Amino acid sequence: MSKLYIVLCLFNLYADYIIRNARLDEVQAGIKIARRNINNLRYADDTTLMAESEELKSLLMKVKKESEKVGLKLNIQKTKITASGPITSWLIDGETVETVADFIFLGSKITTDGDCSHENKRHLLLGRKDMTNLNTLKSRDITLSTKVHLVKAMVFPVVMYGCES
């Protein structure tokens, strides 16, 4: 087993431990989806907290406190806030948490207004670029069926990536 794999597993265990000890599942802050309260999304080393302004700050401070208990430090320079309404900047440990109008989450751009048309256009342009770079499609030696399979395997995933988020 590689050392990197062990390190990643340990990090995920710590992240899960921190979220559990911060008791975020007991907090009413967050977004209701199918009568379930969702206030954090985690993937690899990214954690996204969701709540109203003051509730969000409370969630962040709980995660920060629990992280410090296990020797991890919240990186304020990498921490960003986005909101659908007006929000004041926050100071944590004397540093200002940056407020942004949008951010990238799992490869998709999330904006304060929820508009995803720019993201759709971006993926279509990436697909067009990949289609242009597939020089094998110009070859007369390759059957139409094979060309269709190539496009489905190499272009469609680029265009469709992130369409669920």
Image (cartoon, rainbow, N blue to C red):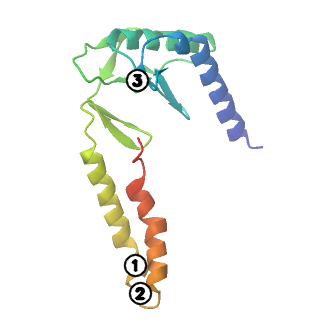
Q: Tell me the quadrant of the picture where the N terminus can be found.
A: top right
Q: Residues within 10 Å of mark 1 (few under 14, many from 20)?
A: few
Q: Residues within 10 Å of mark 2 (few under 14, many from 20)?
A: few
Provide the residue designation for mark 2.
139
Provide the residue designation for mark 1.
135
Q: Earlier in the sequence, mark 2 or mark 3?
A: 3
Residue at disc 3, secondary structure: loop
> Disc 2 or disc 3, which is closer to the eye?
2
Q: Earlier in the sequence, mark 3 or mark 1?
A: 3
Question: Which percent across, then down, holds residue 10?
Answer: 68, 29
Type of amino acid under label 1 = Asn
Residue at disc 1, secondary structure: helix
> Given contact means CB atoms under 8 Å apart, are the residues at marks 2 and 1 in contact?
yes
Residue visible at 32% across and 13% down in the picture = 53
Q: Residues within 10 Å of mark 3 (few under 14, many from 20)?
A: some
Count of marks placed on residues:
3
Q: Alpha-carbon distance for marks 2 and 3?
A: 49 Å
Question: Which percent across, then down, holds residue 2?
Answer: 74, 43
On screen, residue 145 versus residue 68, left or right, reads: left
Residue visible at 25% across and 13% down in the picture = 88
